[in-house]
Image: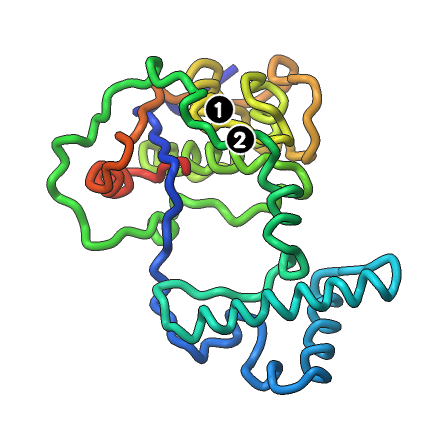
Amino acid sequence: MATISSFSKLFFVAICLSVRMGLSYGDFSIGGYSPDDLTSTEKLINLFDSWMVEYGKVYKDIDEKIYKFEIFKDNLKYIDETNKKNNTYWLGLTSFTDLTNDEFKEKYVGSISESWSTTEESNDEGFIYDDVVNIPASIDWRQKGAVTPVRHQGSCGSCWTFSSVAAVEGINKIVTGRLVSLSEQELLDCERRSYGCRGGFPPYALQYVAQNGIHLRQNYPYEGVQRQCRARQVQGPKVKTDGVGRVPRNNERALIQAIANQPVSV
């Protein structure tokens, strides 16, 4: 099979990042609600009903709807209180607003423990950005055309595949000038050191890409369930990397150096 590109090491970090949005309290079109919606129970119910229509929510009975409304109300309160603080980010209503934190984690995050020590650090290659000194004040890889549109993982805990694929797509764009969508499903099916829809590890996924390459998403589309690996049967080009590198632990400077040069897998 043809290979679109082979390029430098990909980096991953076990840390959450905040995105500076430059928003102020009052940009309610982004949040999906207005302060007036919070002034009465009737208006909250109307907002909830509109939100249900927007996201196609259907509950089995009135008891479940009442239960979900209470969760929705609690989440909306948290959203509004957070937005009033004028942080560097903005929260809003999403399809997940009727879930508790525990429900969200059970459905989308996976059930394996987050132990990065289980991954093979001995296989990681050196940190190539250690000597980088020209670091911009800010960088947004979306503005540079290195990020594909947001995708939905469904009820499968496959976030590790989406994180890994996004990093590969980004570095491929930086090196080749071409932004292509790659296959999360291939990693879900073929990277067997991880646990499929129960969770997984980006370093293993990135090692798979370095060793085998990864197909385009259109040729190996996402299904949201783990199946038998079909990589050998799939036709078309692949993207392959030259290796995998790890951002040094607890080193914010190294993280900045890496992000200034390429997207990283979190």
| Image disc number at residue 205 | 1
State which tag comes first along the sequence, 2 or 1: 2
| Image disc number at residue 98 | none
Q: Position of residue 122 (x, y in %)?
A: 33, 13
User: 100 above or below 93?
Assistant: above
Q: Position of residue 120 (x, y in %)?
A: 40, 16
Q: Quadrant of residue 234?
A: top right
Out of 8 and 59, give the one closest to the viewer: 59
Q: Is residue 4 left or right of residue 70?
A: left
Asked if residue 219 can be seen in this view, the reply is no
Q: Position of residue 227 (x, y in %)?
A: 70, 22
Q: Quadrant of the C terminus?
A: top left
Q: Which residue shows up at 43% across the image and 24% down it?
A: 203
What amino acid type should be assigned to the residue bearing mark 2?
Ser
Asked if residue 53 can be seen in this view, the reply is yes
Mark 2 — residue?
A: 113
User: 149 above or below 39?
Assistant: above
Q: Position of residue 134 (x, y in %)?
A: 12, 43
Q: Which residue shows up at 70% across the image and 67% down it?
A: 70
Out of 248 and 144, give the one closest to the viewer: 248
